[in-house]
Image: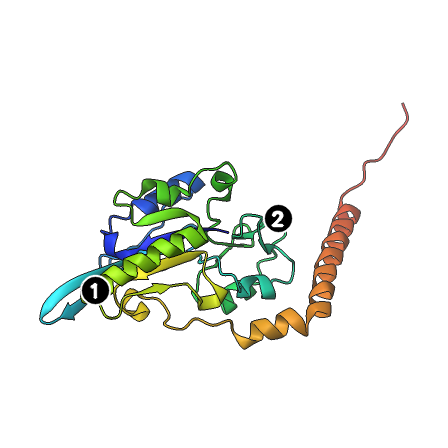
Amino acid sequence: MRAVCIDTTKCIGCRACQVACKQWNQLPAENTEFGGTYENPSKFMHDTWTRVHFREHRVNGEVQWLFAKSQCMHCTEAACISVCPSGATHRTEMGTVLIDNRRCIGCNYCAANCPFAVPRYDHKENAMKKCNFCYNRIVDGLSPACVKACPTGALQYGERRVLMLEAEKRVNNLRAAGYRDARVYGLEEMGGLGVFYVLRDRPSAYGLPDSPKVPMSAYVWGTAFKPVRALAVLGVFLGLVANRFRTRQNQPQETVRGD
């Protein structure tokens, strides 16, 4: 499985990753307003798939900045896949989680069940949008655009097991340096995250949930309601066919006249 490791101790909050994501995926800029923080934008949007958290903390009378890039975590136990009624949200052969916008019906179930509040609804396309892990890059052997743009090496891309070993070594060094709360975040959370972190403080200090879990509704929808999901997809398909048939019927017919 391919993964990205985010070493927050090397992040300087430059947001080059945000810019690279916009450029590679041809996403337009969002209109934002100052909200009393350097963090901008303040939330995910259908055209903003990655962002950097800015957190200010006072430790022993000194102000410390904590930065952490956030995006879709490409979870092993992905709630968004379990609840998707159309099968649009699926796992790729690279181990990442992708939304097929041709099949997405914009139901928002993925957004409602994501513990990281990542997917966002695109009104123009009636579809959900999120980080696609630069799928069109990684299948060609390239790293994601955000990783390529990171100037400090805070983002690393590769085989998850290899990156995890390096992350654990980094955490051991941080603890030896006095950071008792240092940890790898994403080792076991959500069955293992495809985007995991080296943190020197507790997750909530970076704006991350301390113990993310798959909501019970996702388990129910993914198991007991499988037949309902199939019927829902069939219903949508039949509705589209019926709508097209009615549209054709309502079109004015041309009259053929003789000379």
Q: Secondary structure at mark 2?
A: loop
Q: CA distance from mark 1 to mark 2?
A: 50 Å
Residue closest to the eye, 194 or 166: 166
Where is residue 64, by image quadrant? bottom left
Question: Do tag 1 and tag 2 residues touch (Cβ < 8 Å)?
Answer: no
Tag shown at residue 41: none
Task: Determine which residue is flagged by label 2.
Answer: 102
Q: Is residue 239 above or below residue 157?
A: below
Q: Is residue 199 above or below residue 50?
A: below
Q: Position of residue 226 (x, y in %)?
A: 70, 68
Identify the residue shown where x is 24% and y is 48%.
Answer: 14
- Is residue 55 among the parts visible in the rendering? no
Tag shown at residue 176: 1
Task: Say whether disc 1 or disc 2 marks the residue closer to the N-terminus.
Answer: 2
Q: Position of residue 127 (x, y in %)?
A: 55, 54
Identify the residue shown where x is 54% and y is 66%.
Answer: 79
Q: Position of residue 39 (x, y in %)?
A: 26, 57
Identify the residue shown where x is 39% and y is 52%.
Answer: 163
Q: Secondary structure at mark 1?
A: helix
Residue closest to the eye, 209 or 142: 142
Q: Residue furthest top?
A: 259
Where is residue 23, by image quadrant? top left
Q: Position of residue 94 (x, y in %)?
A: 54, 48
